[in-house]
Amino acid sequence: MPPGLEATEAVLRLEGIRKAYNAGRPNEVEVLHGIDFIMQRGEFCALMGPSGSGKSTLLNLIGLLDRPSAGRLAIGGRDTTGLDDRELTRIRGHQIGFVFQYHHLLPAFTAEENVMMPMLLDRGHPDARMRARAATLLENMQLSDWKDNLATNLSGGQQQRVAVARALAMNPPLLLADEPTGNLDSVAAQVVFDLMRRVNREQGTTVLVVTHNLGLARQCDRIVEIVDGVLTGDERLTLHNEPRGSRISSPLQ
Amino acid sequence: MFDWLPFEWIAASRFLREGRMQTAAIVLGVSIGVGVIVFMSALLTGMQKNFINRVLSAQAHVVLLPSEEIARPLRDADGVAEAAVVQKPYQRLRSIDQWQKIEQQVAAMPQVKVVSPMASGPALAVRGDAVRSINLAGIEPAKYFRIVPLDEKIISGRALLGTEDILIGSELANDLGVKVGDKLRITPSSGEGLALKVGGIFDLGNKGANQRNTFVALHTAQSLLRLTGGASSIDVSVHDVYAAEEVASAIRAVADIGADSWIRTNAQFFAAVNAQILANVAIRFFVGLSAAFGVAAVLVVSVVQKSKEIGILRAMGASRGQIMRVFLVEGAAYGLAGSILGSGLGAAALLVWQQYVRNADGTPLIPIELDPQLFLLAAFIATLTGLAAAVAPALRGARLDPVVAIRG
Ligand SMILES: Nc1ncnc2c1ncn2[C@@H]1O[C@H](COP(=O)(O)OP(=O)(O)OP(=O)(O)O)[C@@H](O)[C@H]1O
Ligand SMILES: [Mg+2]
C-alpha cells in the first residue's frame, strides 16, 4: 500500500471477493471470481454490466445481506470477515442504506412510517425526533403531501423516492442502490437519480448504484463494469459529457 | 402510532390487521377451545361444590365412634392358630369410653370448629296401627345445629327439644299421619317405650333421610336406648372440610377411638370426581394442543407470506431477535384475543345452560358461579400457549435468509 493511503481509510474495500451459490453441492456455481474494488468517501459510482453478470450478488455482499465465499470486505475500515449476525446487522443498520429495484416498501405502513422504520428498528420506540427526521426527508423528496398514504397507494416513482428517503434515514455513509430507476419512466428516473446525487453532494454520502441506463451512469463520478463476475472496466468521469436531465437510455436496457 | 409501543408490537399489530381473515379465523378457533374449557371447568367445579354442599349440610365432617372390638385368632403357645375362622364380634350399641374427656380434647384442637355428642340407635315409631322403623338420635341442639343446621330445615313447628319432644322428617310425618303437637310412641329394640310429642317437622331434601331420621334431646335418647350418661358417637366439624381426613387421623392418634371423615365415607364420590377431573384435564390438554397447532400453522403460513417484508426489515437493520419477537407477539395476541372471546362464549354457554337445565322445582340443577379467577387463568394459559406455539414459526422467520427473502 502506498504511504499516506491509510490516513484516509476507504469507505468500502473489497479484496479477492468470490461468491459461489449452492456451495458444496453438485449444482455449485461461482458467480464472482475475485473482485478487488475500493470506494473513497464521497464517490458516486455506477455499476454496469449485462444481466446475470453478478451485480446484485456483489451489492448484496457489500450490503452484508450475504457472505462472500472467499476474500475480504471492509466497511468504513472495519473488516467484516468473521463478524456474527448481530454485528453485521448493526453495521447494516447504521452504515448502509439500501434501495432496491422494486421499491420494496412495507405495504402495511404509511410512507412516513416506512421512512421511520430504520430509526425505529435502531431505537426500539417511535419518538418525535424520528418523526421530524422522516418529515424532513420526505419534504426533500417532495412527498410531504403523501406522508400518511399507505405505501401501496403511491405511484412507482413516489414509492422509489420514499425508498431513497428510507435508505437515508440513519444518515448512512454508504448508499447502495440496485437498479433504483429500473422500473421508472425516464422523467421519474431522473428525479430519483438527482435526489441521490444531491444527497451525495450535500452530505458527502458515498453512493454505489447499479444501472443499465448509460445516460444516468454518465452523470456519475465513476463507472465500473462487471462481466461474468469479473471487473472489466473502471472509468473516472471528471466532466459531465451529458447535459443534466438527459433522456438517452442505454442500449443495454 | 403510539409512542410507548415498541417496534415489535407495532409491526405485529400491522401484520395482524393486514391478514385480518386469518386473524379472525384463528382467534375464533382459539376462542372455541377456550370456551369449551371454561364451560367444562365451571360445570365440574359447580357439580363438585353442589354435591359437597349437599353432603355436608346433612353430615358432620368427622364422626367419632367407639373403637371396634377386635377379634383375634385363638392361638396355642407355639403361635399356631387353633381356630382358623375368625368372626367379627357383634357390635353392641355402646358408649364411647370417657366421651366427655374426648369431647374436650377434640374441641381443643385448633382445626376443629364444633364438637357435638350424640346417642343414637334404632327404634320403632308407633301410632295406632302404623309402625315405622327409625333412627333415634339424641343431640344437644345448641351444638348439633351448628354442624347440621336442622333448625333451618324445619317446615312446621319449632326446633326446640324438651325432654318429651321429638323432631321428625316430613316423610315419616306423612306415613304416620301426624302433625306438630301430636303424640308418637317410640319403642327401642329392647325395653320400655315412651310417648313423645312432635315438636317440629323437617325436610332434609332427601326422602330416605326424611323417613328414617328423628331427633330427641340427648338425655331422652340416653334413657330410651339404655345408654345412661353415654354417647354412641361424637360429630365434629372442622374449619377446612378438605382436611377432614387429616383431622380424623390426628384424633385417632391422640385417643383410642374410631374416627371417620366425610371424605372416607364418600370415597366413591371422590373416586368419581377424581376420574372426572382426570378426564377433564385430558380434554383440556388436547383442546389446548389443537389450538396451539392451529396458531402454529397460521403463523407458519404468515411467516412465508411475510418473507419479503422480513427480508426488507433485515436489510434495514432489523435483528433476528426483533423479527422473532414480532411473531411471538402475534402468537400471544392470538391466544389472548381468543381467550377473551372464548371466556365470553363459555360464560354465555353457562348462562344458557343454567337457564334451561333445571330441577323439577325450577331451581338450577347445578348452581354455577362465574369465578373471575377462572377467566384470568384461561387468559394467562391461552396467552402462554399462543406464545409457545409461535416459537417455531418465529424462529423460522428470524432465520430466513434476507437475500432469498428479498429476491423471492
Ligand atoms: N441464490 C442463487 N442461487 C443460485 N444462483 C444464483 C442465485 N442468485 C443469483 N444466481 C446466479 O448468479 C448469477 C448472477 O446473478 P445476479 O442476480 O447477481 O445478476 P445481475 O447482474 O444482478 O443480473 P440482473 O441485471 O439481471 O439483475 C446469475 O447467473 C444468477 O442466475
Ligand atoms: Mg440484479
Image (cartoon, coloured by chain):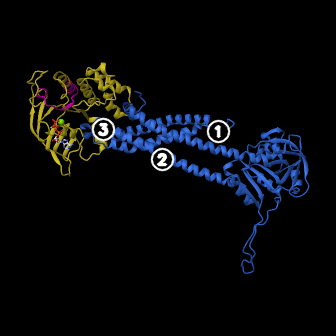
Chain colours: A yellow, B blue
Task: Pinpoint residue B67: horizontal percent, then vertical percent.
Answer: 77, 61
For marks 2 and 1 on the same chain, the one whose residue lies earlier in the sequence: 2
Residue ID at (58%, 49%): B276
Q: The C terminus of chain B lies in which quarter of the figure?
A: top left
For marks 3 and 2 on the same chain, the one whose residue lies earlier in the sequence: 2
> What residue did someone put label 3 on?
B307
Task: Pinpoint residue B22: horizontal percent, then vertical percent.
Answer: 39, 35
What is the count of numbered marks? 3
Whether ligand 1 has any atom under 8 Å from the Cβ at mark 1 is answered as no
Residue ID at (89%, 40%): B181
> What residue did someone put label 1 on?
B367
Pointer 2 chain: B
Looking at the rendering, the quadrant in which ligand 1 lies is: top left
For marks 1 and 3 on the same chain, the one whose residue lies earlier in the sequence: 3
Disc 2 residue type (three-letter): Phe
Task: Pinpoint residue A176: horizontal percent, then vertical percent.
Answer: 21, 33
Disc 1 residue type (three-letter): Pro
Assess whether residue A198 is covered by the magenta stretch.
Answer: yes
Disc 3 residue type (three-letter): Ser
Q: Secondary structure at mark 2?
A: helix
Part of the protein shown in magenta: A194-217
Residue at mark 2 shares a chain with residue at mark 1:
yes
